[in-house]
Amino acid sequence: MSLGQWFYSPDHGQLCQVVETQMLWGETVCRVWLPGKDTIMRMLIGCANVLKTLRERTLMREFEEYRESKQKRLKVFRLEAVRAGFKKAWQERDYATIIAVAHKIPENVLQEDPKLLMWYDQAVTRMGEE
């Protein structure tokens, strides 16, 4: 976890922001700010990593919904989920998925996001499609 990073804490039912990372009795501990309660709490890094994994799973579920959607154009989508899905598809060399989902999101969104554009352009190149 890095300073300033936001993540969702199911234990607290809200977003938290990492304000400090420290070693305490041989364990790495984060101090996080809970804006809904305006308080700072300590959280073990292990707990934060579990939360990060849960977040990634949620994003991938959303991306799968976009991929399987029968809509030609997605009107409502989460950019963060598209990024996570493109990243995973790229790692798995699933270029067809990147291209298929890219065709469902608005062109201006794709053109204005450097990471999405990079993954899309590279996928098109690797697939030999234009």
Image (cartoon, grey):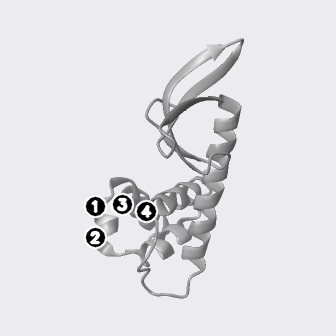
Residue 35 x, y percent position in the rendering: 47, 42
Q: Is residue 15 above or below residue 105?
A: above
Residue 119 x, y percent position in the rendering: 43, 58
Q: In this figure, which residue is indicated by the disc labeled 2?
A: 108
How much space separates mark 4 and mark 1, taking CA atoms? 11 Å
Q: Secondary structure at mark 1?
A: helix
Asked if the residue under mark 1 is in contact with the one under mark 3, i.e. CB atoms within 8 Å, the reply is no
Residue 90 x, y percent position in the rendering: 54, 56
Q: Is residue 46 left or right of residue 68?
A: right
Point 55% across, 88% down: residue: 70
Q: In this figure, which residue is indicated by the disc labeled 4?
A: 79
Point 54% across, 75% down: residue: 66
Q: Earlier in the sequence, mark 3 or mark 2?
A: 2
Amino acid under disc 4 = Leu
How much space separates mark 3 and mark 2, taking CA atoms? 10 Å
Point 38% across, 62% down: residue: 121
Asked if the residue under mark 2 is in contact with the one under mark 1, i.e. CB atoms within 8 Å, the reply is yes
Point 66% across, 47% down: residue: 53
